């Protein structure tokens, strides 16, 4: 292994949890780390939240590990996702043993379209009274997402027992845009012989908390995936343990779902779990599946036996949890 990994801690607890994940990557592999800045602090210093060198480092790297940015989050994350040409955002939400979860049976992976929908950036103020937004859906991006979803399921990367995927949409109302999304996704799955079921996204939002066992892999348009995966986060015990991967054809950007946590930043007590699990996804993206699984097992072991950070009811520091994870590797 000598892949290049760009490392962008960002602001707040990003500065505390990313170094733990770098130590974990260093413990299992031999990577070249390239450090770069992004976020509020670098904006205060230089006037820009995403310096050109940072974007270039991300474009040059095989993969990027990102912490979080504060007020400038949108100015940082959206361009970084496009710098890796990410077409899918993978967001697993599962309740780990030892963690107090509202719905411990939850084990769901969201595959969220990552480039279009209402986040495509076509928003206008047309008058003092009127703002509009153009929603973008292409068959090509929808099909690309569906192909990824089929490969994901076929490769056994879904939760145990996954046989196909659920596609959520609102094609009964947004007939053209979500209709196009639904038709593209379902037709790719049909061509490949992958089972799908469809659910309107509002009904899904009711059913997921009631029957989490019914869902494994869920394919969503961009905004729906953002909201529904956060809903799932609430079911599994909060943000400290939720990783994510922004995957492109050549590169990937891996980041915890959480933000800078200003309420606990600087205290050294942030849970590094989400970022370390994001690093496990990075390892798998680079083809080191066994190492990714080792990291996941180490995190699970520490969650089950402790030490735990205060968000999980413990009194350990970020560093103590990081050391415990590395000891298990
Ligand atoms: P947040 O995720 O930073 O915090 C929400 C709550 O969860 C807080 O009580 C925090 O202490 C807790 N929390 C989050 N991560 C934790 C961890 N690893 N360990 C223990 N507790 C944790 O979300 P919030 O408060 O809405 O946003 C704070 C700032 O972060 C804002 O400036 C926002 O723009 C930014 N943000 C950035 C994101 C990114 O860079 N990807 C994503 C979400 C928010
Ligand atoms: Mg979100």
Image (tube, rainbow, N blue to C red):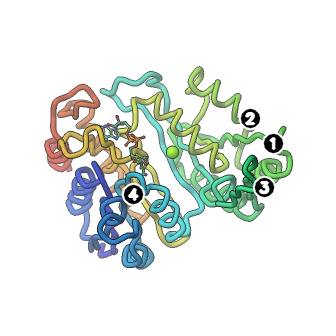
Task: State the residue position of label 1.
Answer: 171
Dot 2: element:
strand
**Spatial CA span between label 3 and label 2:** 16 Å
Looking at the image, is mark 3 or mark 2 nearer the viewer?
Answer: 2
Q: Which image quarter holds the N terminus?
A: bottom left
The image position of residue 133, as x and y in percent, is 73, 53
The image position of residue 113, as x and y in percent, is 63, 54
Task: State the residue position of label 2.
Answer: 200
Q: Write the residue at 40% across / 44% down.
A: 258
Dot placed on the residue nearer the N-terminal end, 3 or 2? 3
Task: State the residue position of label 4.
Answer: 289
Q: Nearer the viewer, residue 315 or 211?
A: 315
| Residue 294 visible here | no
| Left or right side of 29 for 112 | right
Dot placed on the residue nearer the N-terminal end, 3 or 4? 3
Dot placed on the residue nearer the N-terminal end, 1 or 3? 1
> In this rendering, is residue 289 above or below 325?
below
The image position of residue 248, as x and y in percent, is 54, 66
- The answer to whether the beta carbon of the residue marked 1 is less than 8 Å from any atom of ligand 2 is no
Mark 1 and mark 2 in contact? Answer it, CB < 8 Å.
yes
**Spatial CA span between label 4 and label 2:** 34 Å
Q: Write the residue at 72% across / 60% down.
A: 143
Q: Write the residue at 44% across / 55% down.
A: 73
């Amino acid at each position: 292994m000598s892949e290049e990994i760009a490392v962008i801690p960002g602001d707040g607890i990003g500065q505390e949890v990313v170094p733990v994940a770098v130590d974990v990557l260093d413990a299992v592999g031999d990577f070249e780390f390239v450090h770069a800045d992004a976020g509020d602090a670098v904006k205060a210093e230089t006037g820009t939240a995403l310096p050109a060198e940072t974007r270039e480092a991300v474009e040059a790297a095989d993969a990027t590990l990102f912490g979080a940015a504060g007020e400038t989050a949108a100015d940082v994350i959206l361009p970084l996702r496009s710098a890796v040409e990410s077409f899918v955002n993978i967001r697993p939400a599962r309740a780990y043993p030892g963690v107090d979860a509202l719905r411990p049976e939850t084990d769901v992976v969201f595959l969220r379209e990552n480039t279009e929908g209402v986040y495509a950036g076509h928003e206008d103020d047309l008058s003092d009274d009127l703002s509009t937004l153009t929603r973008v859906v292409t068959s090509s991006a929808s099909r690309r997402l569906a192909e990824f979803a089929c490969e994901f399921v076929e490769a056994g990367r879904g939760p145990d027992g996954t046989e196909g995927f659920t596609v959520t949409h609102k094609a009964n109302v947004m007939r053209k845009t979500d209709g196009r999304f639904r038709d593209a996704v379902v037709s790719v799955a049909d061509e490949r012989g992958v089972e799908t079921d469809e659910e309107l996204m509002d009904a899904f939002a009711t059913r997921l908390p009631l029957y989490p066992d019914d869902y494994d892999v869920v394919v969503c348009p961009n905004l729906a995936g953002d909201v529904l995966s956060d809903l799932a986060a609430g079911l599994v015990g909060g943000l400290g343990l939720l990783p994510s991967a922004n995957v492109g054809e050549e590169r990937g950007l891996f980041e915890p779902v959480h933000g800078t946590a200003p309420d606990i930043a600087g205290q050294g007590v942030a849970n590094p779990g989400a970022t370390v699990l994001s690093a496990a996804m990075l390892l798998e993206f680079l083809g080191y599946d066994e190492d990714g699984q080792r990291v996941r097992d180490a995190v699970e072991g520490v969650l089950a036996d402790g030490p735990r950070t205060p968000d999980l009811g413990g009194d350990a520091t970020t560093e103590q949890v990081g050391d415990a994870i590395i000891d298990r590797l």
